[in-house]
C-alpha cells in the first residue's frame, strides 16, 4: 500500500511505524510543513499503562522513550500557601519533551524505511493523488479536514477559561498544582518536569481574573513578569519561559474542543487532533493520538476493502475515546466552576480536584459529596480486609495488536490529565 501522511506529529509517526512492523513492503511518506526540530511545545505526560502498551507493540521505540523520560509518583497541591500531598501507590507518571519524543519516533520510522519530508506542505489530496491512502494528521487546524469541513461535520466548542502554556527552569520533583487567590479571583497553574532541567507550567484563570489582573492588555514579557510574582513560591525564583523555539511567542488562549461527525472521506482519514481534541487538563492527547494509529493499522489489516476498513476504524475508535471526551469536558467544567470548590479545606478541595471526572459531582453540594465519598472509602477499606484473595489470572495469550488500540483507559481520568 502506498500511504501519504500529512503532518509529522505522534499519530502519523506511530502509524507509519506500526504499518511497517506489520508489513515492511508498505510505501509510506510523511510530509511535515515545518523544519526538522521546530515543534512548539514543552513536555508531554504518560503513565505506566501507556508505557507498557508501547513496549508490547514496539519495544525499540518504547525503550528509547523510557530512557529519555523523567518520573514522579507523588502530587502536591498548594492552596494559597496550604500544602496537600497525594501519593499514587504503584502508579508512576512520566514526562518527556515533546520535541524529544517526536525525534525518537522520527528516527524509528526512518530506520524502518519510512520517508519523512520536512518543509513540505500538502494542502490538498490532489497533491498526493498517487497514494492509496491519505492520513490527515496535521493537527487541530488541519488544512486537509477544513477543505471538507461540511462532509466531516466539524464542530468546535470554545472553553470559557483562558490559559497559557509555558516552560520553566524550575525542576518539579513531583507533579504540582498551585492555586493563588488575587483581588480579582483565583489563578492557578500545574507543572511537571519533562527533562533534567525543565518543566512544563500551564497557567489558567477565568476571563474575569485575566482582565482584572490586566493580562488582557499585556505583551508576553509583561504577562510572564506578573505570573512569576504570583507564583513566586512555587517557582522558587526561577523564570517562566514563553515558547520553546527562538522567535516564538506565548499567547493566552481559550481551549477549543473539536469533534467530527465523520472521520473518513474516500481514501482520506483523520487521526489525532485533526479528528478530535480533549481538554489539556486530562493530558490524554498523546495517548489518544497513538491509540488512533493502532486502531487504524488494525482496521487496515483486517482483510476488509479500504473503504470498509476506514469505516470500521471510525466506528470502533469513536466508541473507545468517548469516555475520554466525557472526562475532558467534566475536567474543564470543574476548573470553570472553581469557586464552587476552592472554599473547602485544602484536603477536601484536592480530593474533589482528583475526582472532577465524576458526573455526579456538579449535581451535589461539594461538602456532601466529599463526606459521602469519605465514608464510602472507609467502607471499602473495611471490606477489603475481609475480601478473599483474587483468583489467579486466566493465562490467556497476550495480544500486542490489542494493547495500544484499547484506548487511554484510566490514564484519561488521571487528576493531572
Image (tube, rainbow, N blue to C red):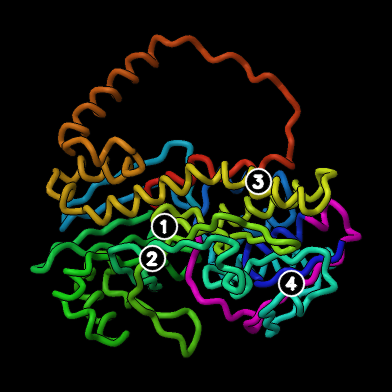
Mark toward the viewer: 4 or 3: 4
Q: Inspect the magenta stretch and tell me whether residue 231 lies in it.
A: no
Magenta stretch?
Answer: 19-44
Q: Nearer the viewer, residue 248 or 405?
A: 405
User: What residue is pinned by disc 3?
Assistant: 404
Asked if the residues shown at circle 4 and circle 3 are in contact, with their CB atoms under 8 angstroms apart, the answer is no
In the drawing, does residue 122 fall left or right of residue 42?
right
Mark toward the viewer: 3 or 1: 1
Mark 4 vs mark 2, CA separation in Å: 28 Å
State which quadrant residue 160 falls in: bottom left
Secondary-structure class at tag 1: loop
Mark 4 vs mark 1, CA separation in Å: 27 Å
Mark 3 vs mark 1, CA separation in Å: 21 Å
User: What residue is pinned by disc 1?
Assistant: 279
Picture layout, residue 68 above or below residue 240: above
What crowding class fits label 4: few (fewer than 14 Cα within 10 Å), some (14-19), or many (20 or more)? Answer: many
Asked if the residues shown at circle 1 and circle 2 are in contact, with their CB atoms under 8 angstroms apart, the answer is yes
Mark 1 vs mark 2, CA separation in Å: 7 Å
Task: Estimate the x, y position of residue 349 in percent, counting from the top left.
Answer: 21, 44
User: What residue is pinned by disc 2?
Assistant: 255
What is the residue that sits farthest to the front in this orientation?
Answer: 150
Secondary-structure class at tag 2: strand
Secondary-structure class at tag 4: strand
Mark earlier in primary sequence (3, 2) = 2
| Residue at 60% across, 75% down | 143
Amino acid at each position: 500500500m502506498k500511504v501519504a501522511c500529512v503532518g509529522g506529529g505522534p499519530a502519523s509517526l506511530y502509524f507509519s511505524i506500526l504499518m511497517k512492523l506489520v508489513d515492511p513492503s508498505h510505501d509510506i511518506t510523511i510530509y511535515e510543513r515545518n523544519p526538522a526540530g521546530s515543534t512548539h511545545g514543552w513536555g508531554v505526560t504518560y503513565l505506566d499503562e501507556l508505557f507498557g502498551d508501547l513496549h508490547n507493540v514496539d519495544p525499540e521505540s518504547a525503550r528509547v522513550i523510557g530512557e529519555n523520560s523523567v518520573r514522579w509518583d507523588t502530587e502536591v497541591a498548594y492552596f494559597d500557601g496550604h500544602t496537600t500531598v497525594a501519593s499514587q501507590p504503584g502508579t508512576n507518571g512520566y514526562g518527556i519533551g515533546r520535541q524529544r519524543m517526536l525525534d525518537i519516533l522520527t528516527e524509528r520510522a526512518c530506520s524502518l524505511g519510512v520517508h519523512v519530508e520536512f518543509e513540505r506542505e500538502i494542502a490538498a489530496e490532489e497533491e498526493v493523488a498517487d497514494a492509496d491512502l491519505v492520513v490527515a494528521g496535521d493537527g487541530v487546524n488541519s488544512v486537509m479536514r477544513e477543505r471538507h469541513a461540511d462532509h466531516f461535520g466539524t464542530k468546535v466548542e470554545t472553553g470559557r477559561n483562558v490559559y497559557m502554556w509555558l516552560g520553566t527552569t524550575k525542576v518539579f520533583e513531583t507533579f504540582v498544582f498551585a492555586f493563588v487567590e488575587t483581588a480579582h479571583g483565583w489563578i492557578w497553574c500545574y507543572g511537571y518536569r519533562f527533562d533534567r532541567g525543565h518543566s512544563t507550567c500551564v497557567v489558567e484563570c477565568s476571563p474575569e481574573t485575566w482582565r482584572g489582573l490586566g493580562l488582557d492588555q499585556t505583551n508576553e514579557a509583561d504577562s510572564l513578569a506578573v505570573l512569576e510574582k504570583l507564583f513566586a513560591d512555587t517557582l522558587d525564583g526561577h523564570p517562566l519561559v514563553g515558547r520553546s523555539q527562538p522567535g516564538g511567542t506565548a499567547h493566552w488562549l481559550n481551549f477549543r474542543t473539536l469533534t467530527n461527525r465523520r472521520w473518513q472521506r474516500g481514501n482520506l482519514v483523520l487521526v489525532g487532533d485533526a479528528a478530535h481534541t480533549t481538554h489539556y487538563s486530562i493530558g490524554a492527547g498523546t495517548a489518544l493520538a497513538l491509540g488512533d494509529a493502532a486502531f487504524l493499522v488494525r482496521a487496515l489489516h483486517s482483510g476488509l476493502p479500504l473503504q470498509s476498513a476506514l469505516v470500521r476504524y471510525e466506528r470502533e475508535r469513536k466508541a473507545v475515546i468517548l469516555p475520554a471526551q466525557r472526562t475532558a469536558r467534566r475536567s474543564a467544567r470543574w476548573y470553570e466552576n472553581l469557586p464552587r470548590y476552592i472554599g473547602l479545606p485544602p484536603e477536601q478541595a484536592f480530593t474533589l480536584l482528583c475526582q472532577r471526572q465524576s458526573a455526579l459531582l456538579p449535581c451535589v453540594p461539594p461538602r456532601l459529596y466529599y463526606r459521602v465519598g469519605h465514608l464510602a472509602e472507609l467502607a471499602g477499606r473495611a471490606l477489603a480486609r475481609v475480601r478473599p484473595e483474587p483468583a489467579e489470572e486466566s493465562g490467556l495469550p497476550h495480544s500486542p495488536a490489542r494493547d495500544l488500540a484499547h484506548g487511554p483507559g484510566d490514564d484519561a481520568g488521571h487528576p493531572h490529565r
